[in-house]
Each structure stands twice: as C-alpha cells, then as structure tokens.
C-alpha cells in the first residue's frame, strides 16, 4: 500500500487533508508532519530563507525515511522549497499550489490571486507566471493582499478574518477570469459568499493537490475517480 506524507506549517490543516485522503485516495495510507516554525520564521524574515529551505529539505527526507512514497508540502509560503526538493529527491515531492496554478492558467488570461500574507502572495504569483510561460500563455496577474485578515485570525477573531477576506474576494471577481486562493484555509470563506460574488471560478489548492498525488500513486484509479 502506498503512503503519502503531508508536511504542514500549521496543525489546522491536518483534518482537511485527512478527509481528502480518505475521499480521494481510500487505498493510500497517510501521515502528517507539522513544523509551525517554518511559517513563523518565513513571516519574521519576510521571505523564504536558505536556512528554512534546508530545514524543509531535511523534513521531506525524514518523511521519506519514515516510509512515505511521496510528500505533499501544504504551505504555499514554503512552496519554492518543495520545487527544489522535487528536483533533488528520487521520489515525488508535490507543491500544494502547483496543480491549482496550472488550472488557473488554463481557465483565463486575467488571474486574480488572493492572500492574507505577502510571503504567500509572492510565491503563488511567481508560480502562476512560471506555469503560464511553460504553457506559452500570456496572463495578467491581479494581486489582492487582504490587509488585517491574518492578524485577525491570529488573535482568534475568525469573524473579522472572514469578513475582510470576503470583501476582498467580492471586489476581485469583477476584474478577473478566475480567482486563485493562495491559502488552503480560504476555501471555507468562499463557501459562505453570496452567489453574486462567485461569478468566476475560485480555485483552492488542497483538493487539486491531493488529486495530483492520486494520479502519481494510484494511476490505475485516477482516471476512474476523476
């Protein structure tokens, strides 16, 4: 039986990816690794440092030594480290937002990217531009940094976080062909938006990422379940 390891920077995402694993890959075992200091230090430094990249690589290698056949890095802020790891290791390392970026490029030329952290926004935007270039497509990326939302959720005020993010998304949809949610936790807010604020596709990374893992670990069932 194949095994997937999830590398998180917050324990909040473990229930979501557990549920997706059971739904999308019922024949695949999974385990979680969480290191909150990875995102904390990235926010402190304002960017992904070489030291944090080295630590991510060490954790990915540890996951593989622990039995994982593939590793999914679930935090977009450390996504570039996952890209490096995919080139270095002889087992699959999946970046959580990669499939989402590919889908966004295929859906439109005006791509909105919503985030509550600059350290998440920038790598997601860069990834979309890289995917567009690889696909030979010209895209315009419209950035939407939702100021104050991250600070609100850190303070335990999820209502303010959701309101600020909802307002940002409601304004963004009128100027783009598709919206990319740079953080996996945003999908919950999208479900609460009124219909007139969901007039374009809004892409969230977790489900697309898990399906890309399924295609790697379960190629015989991926086409059937898609």
Image (cartoon, rainbow, N blue to C red):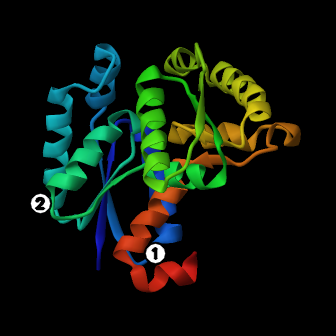
Q: Mark 2 sits on what residue? A: 65
Under tag 1, what secondary structure? loop
Question: Residue shown at 27%/36% (left/top)?
Answer: 35
Q: CA distance from mark 2 to mark 1?
A: 23 Å
Could you tell whether 84 is left or right of 139 in the image?
left
Residue 14 placement (x, y as % from top left): 42, 48
Vertical order, 88 against 49 (above or below): below
Which disc number belongs to residue 139? none
Question: Residue shown at 20%/35% (left/top)?
Answer: 53
Could you tell whether 37 is left or right of 96 in the image?
left
Question: Which quadrant holds residue 77?
Answer: top left
Could you tell whether 126 is left or right of 183 in the image?
left
Residue 177 placement (x, y as % from top left): 72, 43
Say which quadrant the N terminus sits in: bottom left
Which disc number belongs to residue 26? 1
Is residue 97 visible in this depiction of the protein?
Answer: no
Say which quadrant the C terminus sits in: bottom right
At label 1, counting other C-alpha atoms closer than 10 Å, the crowd grade (few under 14, some 14-19, many 20 or more) is few
**Front-most of residues 163 and 175:** 175
Vertical order, 143 against 7 (above or below): above
At label 2, counting other C-alpha atoms closer than 10 Å, the crowd grade (few under 14, some 14-19, many 20 or more) is few
Residue 94 placement (x, y as % from top left): 34, 55
Vertical order, 215 against 179 (above or below): below
Under tag 2, what secondary structure? helix
């Amino acid at each position: 039986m194949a095994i997937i390891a999830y590398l998180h920077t917050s324990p909040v995402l473990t229930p979501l990816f557990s549920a997706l694993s059971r739904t999308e890959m019922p024949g695949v075992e999974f385990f979680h690794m969480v290191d909150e200091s990875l995102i904390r230090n990235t926010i402190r430094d304002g960017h992904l440092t070489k030291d944090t990249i080295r630590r991510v690589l060490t954790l990915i290698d540890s996951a593989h030594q622990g039995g994982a056949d593939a590793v999914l890095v679930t935090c977009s802020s450390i996504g570039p480290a996952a890209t490096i790891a995919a080139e270095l290791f002889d087992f699959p390392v999946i970046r959580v937002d990669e499939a989402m970026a590919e889908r966004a490029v295929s859906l439109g030329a005006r791509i909105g990217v919503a985030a509550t952290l600059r350290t998440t926004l920038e790598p997601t935007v860069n990834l979309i531009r890289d995917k567009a270039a690889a696909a030979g497509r010209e895209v315009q990326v419209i950035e939407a940094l939702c100021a104050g939302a991250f600070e609100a959720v850190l303070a335990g005020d999820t209502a303010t976080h959701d309101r600020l993010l909802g307002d940002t998304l409601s304004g963004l949809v009128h100027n783009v062909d598709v919206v990319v949610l740079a953080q996996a936790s945003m999908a919950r807010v999208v479900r609460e938006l009124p219909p007139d604020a969901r007039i374009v596709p809004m892409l969230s990374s977790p489900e697309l990422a898990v399906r890309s893992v399924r295609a790697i670990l379960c190629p015989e069932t991926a086409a059937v379940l898609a």
